Image: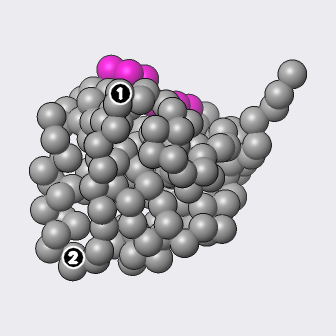
Amino acid sequence: MPILPKLQEFLDLSGVPYTHTVHPLAYTAREVAHAEHVPAQEVAKAVIIVADGEYKMAVLPASRVLDFPEVRTVLGSPSARLATEDELGRIFPDCELGAMPPFGNLYHMKVLFDAALLADEQIAFNAGTHRDVIHMQCADYRRLVHPEVVSLAREPVTR
């Protein structure tokens, strides 16, 4: 499965520059960072949240994890939760499970963009598969997606 066709068409029509790379199989955003030889901070991972019966896409650096108390505060929803694998399969039938690109606008969902991603000019992200990655300017991504920039992630706790 190559780059997600609807993503490629959207990017090509937008006219923004981007590069497409292919790497060995990588299932986590941190593995993608390693395979792509970029800092984990630059790899944007998409996490789907269900809040008040609606799906929302949270986009955060691979180096961070969702802070659910913060997510619930930002969304004003004490019952916000992660989407299940079954839900992900239904929402993103054209993507490999867990490899959806951070373009919630292509799936009619609100996108919350963690402010930590603003620290780097470039971002990289899955393009619908566990092998295909798009690299582009963060500013271009924000112009195309119009995400709400919020703080919703934290550094993982190490033991």
Residue 125 in view, yes or no: yes
Q: Is residue 85 above or below residue 148?
A: above
Q: How many marks?
A: 2
- The amino acid beneath tag 2 is Ser
Residue 47 coordinates in the image, percent (x, y) = 48, 40
Q: Residue at x 54, y 72 (%)?
A: 121
Viewer-proximal residue among 7 and 2: 2
Say which quadrant the N terminus sits in. Answer: top left
- How far from the left and from the top, in percent, is residue 55? 40, 43
Question: With 147 as the anchor, is 133 left or right in this view?
Answer: left
Q: Quadrant of residue 159?
A: top right
Q: Position of residue 120 (x, y in %)?
A: 60, 67
For the view shown, which residue lies furthest in the front direction? 37
Disc 1 and disc 2 in contact, CB within 8 angstroms:
no
Q: Could you tell me how far apart the alpha carbons at marks 1 and 2 are, in whole angstroms?
A: 28 Å
Residue 84 on the magenta segment = yes
Span colored in magenta:
81-87
Of marks 1 and 2, the one in the foreground:
1
Dot 1 lies on which element?
Answer: loop
Q: Residue at x 19, y 46 (%)?
A: 4
Query: At x 53% / y 39%, what residue is drawn?
Result: 34
| Residue at the disc numbered 1 | 25
Around disc 1, counting alpha carbons within 10 Å, would you say few (fewer than 14), some (14 to 19), or many (20 or more)? few
Residue behind mark 2: 14
Question: Mark 1 belongs to which amino acid?
Answer: Leu
Q: Residues within 10 Å of mark 2 (few under 14, many from 20)?
A: few
Residue 149 sits above or below residue 67 on the image:
below
Q: Secondary structure at mark 2?
A: helix
Q: Is residue 104 visible?
A: no
> Which quarter of the picture shows residue 63?
top right
Decide: is 19 above or below 37.
below
